[in-house]
Amino acid sequence: MPSLKPATIADVLVVEPEAHGDERGRFVETYRRQWFPLGREMLQGNRSEKQGGAVVGLHYHLHQADYWYVLRGRARIVLHDLREGSPTEGTTETIEADGAEDRGLFIPPGVAHGFAALTDLLLWYLVDGYYNPADELGLAWDDPDVAADWGITDPVLSARDRSNPCKRDITVRPRAGLRT
């Protein structure tokens, strides 16, 4: 059974699964639906490869949860709770992830999330909803109200991430406990 640890932000879970190995290699069960009481069935798996120095995010969804697992490289994951009524509303948290360690991260809807690739990086992640452009929302990576420490001074950003609005300009805010 893995170790399931609550993060600072409500409903975010850090998963430290058991690794098994011998001279042939190793085996790790990285995800199991029953570990996540707030989770739904994951429907889509994705792979993201980024060069060191890249920053992705902050992204958020009103209806979709994510489960992230770094397979190779090091990342600084930044989370910010946008959910109105959440006990941790407005909280920013950073979590270090390293492919040399086994650690997963469950991110519920309404929690903005992103990562800085501290090295070249391979991230595998699952989502509990199919791609829906109407549920692909963003928050400025450098918003002073979020005050994220990305661990990178001159990030490589996509056009989308350079144009995400600041928190004060977001017109649609998620509510705690909202799932459809």
Image (tube, rainbow, N blue to C red):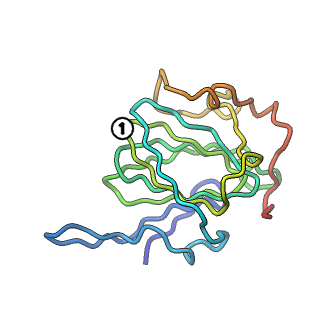
Which residue appears at 70% of the width and 36% of the height?
139
Residue that sits furthest to the top in the current view:
154
Which residue appears at 39% of the width and 42% of the height?
121
Residue 48 point in image, percent of width and height: 47, 46
SS at badge 1: loop
Which residue appears at 40% of the width and 72% of the height?
29
Which image quadrant is residue 65 in?
bottom right
Please tell me whether residue 40 is drawn above or below residue 172 in the rendered image. Answer: below
Residue that sits furthest to the right in the current view:
171
Left or right: 131 as drawn, with respect to 106 = right
Q: Amino acid at mark 1?
A: Asp
Between residue 91 and residue 75, name the one nearer to us: 75
Between residue 150 and residue 58, name the one nearer to us: 58
Which residue appears at 72% of the width and 46% of the height?
133
Q: What residue sits right under mark 1 in the picture?
A: 120
Left or right: 33 as drawn, with respect to 96 = right
Quadrant placement of the C terminus: bottom right
Between residue 50 and residue 58, name the one nearer to us: 50
Residue 32 point in image, percent of width and height: 51, 74
Quadrant placement of the N terminus: bottom left
Label 1 packing within 10 angstroms: few (<14), some (14-19), many (20+): some
Residue 23 point in image, percent of width and height: 13, 69
